[in-house]
Amino acid sequence: MKFANGHLAYCTNIHPAETWAETLSVLKKHSLKVRDKLCAQSPGQPSNQPYAIGLRLSAIAAKELLEGRHLADFKQWLDQENCYVFTINGFPYGAFHGTRVKEQVYRPDWTSQDRLDYTKNLFTIIAQLVPEGMDGSVSTLPASFKAFEANEEEVFAQLEACAIHIEELSQKHQRDLHLGMEPEPLGHFENTQETLAFFERLFSSAADPELLRRRIGINYDTCHFALEFDDCHSSLESFQKAGLRISKIHLSSALTLDLTHTKAISSLKGFDEPTYLHQVITKGPSGELCRYQDIPEFLATENSHPQARIHFHIPIYSHPEAPLGSTQDHVTDIIEYTTKHPELCSHFEIETYTWAVLPDDLQIEIESQIAQEYRWVLAQLS
């Protein structure tokens, strides 16, 4: 939906869907229900306002959508339902629910032709979906996973080829299209300093660095930067100073843990589940950080730090009981910052994809959860 400084959607990666038929089915079943709940429960929102969909497409779904009349029929359905698409999540390439995802979410990475072809397909789609007068974004992984030790020369070559494709589509369709790379704990680049350094190397390697600056930027996930104990305002100021584009902002909260509490470890065990990667970062009294790939590695290690942050997306309106907590303040910080700097970014997406694996006390009906997250965000924006 449109608000004063941009567009807000929730990311449909929360719904299991791998084929195009499955994806369209969940949009009809869940996204429209969220829209109707939001309109019914938010009297201040005009009922005739176009409703934005934050689309997630797997590689299979993207390929199928480009076949036959699927894309034309989808555009017609969007018009009929008064909906529009301004962004696509292109981070998870394949299955994202109901199986062990963990570090495999980074495969194929940006050394792979498959990743490039998939992302090109997503831009071919968004170029035709985004309404006139709006820019269109696709988000992707931070090049690779640290443990994969990706060859940066291969990464840079693939990204440059993608930027050229985005530029051609932007010119052809008269739309401002851009790719947002999403820093994440233990990704190829994960925090503010590593992100700055990565983009400096990327631009230095490019034949046309200005083209890359125009078409490739950052997908700023508030959960991920909070996990790194980075300050929101300082990070965004550093990115602006470096001339980096903020392509999209993911509004999401991480889990925090007071490690001085007697029930700290037992409280965390309820979040140890086998589907997603739950990186853990702890901070010592002098500011030193320790990183763990997942909850089991953290639980198996002696750690004397007083606080931990866990990559487990929890609803952004929620307030877990001590010793647990959330990084909700990073979300409010970025809303405050972007309200003062509306030129920074116009794409905002709620991204709490862990509904199916949340502990029972944090679960409510999925459409109600999403609608409640919308209402919380809209309250902050107002």
Image (cartoon, helix red, strand yellow):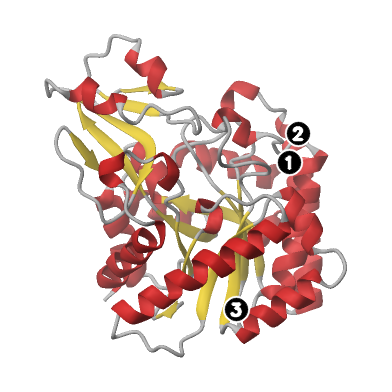
Say which residue appears at 51% left-offset and 59% top-offset.
11
Q: Which residue is mark 1?
A: 156
Amino acid tagged 1 = Phe
Q: Quadrant of the C terminus?
A: bottom left
Q: Secondary structure at mark 3?
A: loop
* Number of residues whose C-alpha sits closer than 10 Å to that of mark 3, classed few (under 14), some (14–19) or many (20 or more): some
Q: Earlier in the sequence, mark 2 or mark 3?
A: 3
Amino acid tagged 2 = Glu
Single out the mark in the foreground, 2 or 3.
3
Q: Which mark is residue 134?
A: 3
Residue 131 occupies which quadrant of the picture?
bottom right
Q: Secondary structure at mark 1?
A: helix
Residue 103 occupies which quadrant of the picture?
top right
Q: Which residue is mark 2?
A: 153
Tell me where residue 207 appears, x and y as whole percent: 79, 50
- Depicted 293 relative to depicted 32: above or below: above
Tell me where residue 125 appears, x and y as whole percent: 74, 66
- Depicted 322 relative to depicted 248: above or below: above
Tell me where residue 167 appears, x and y as whole percent: 76, 65
Camera-nearest residue between 118 and 65: 65
What count of labels does the image hold?
Answer: 3
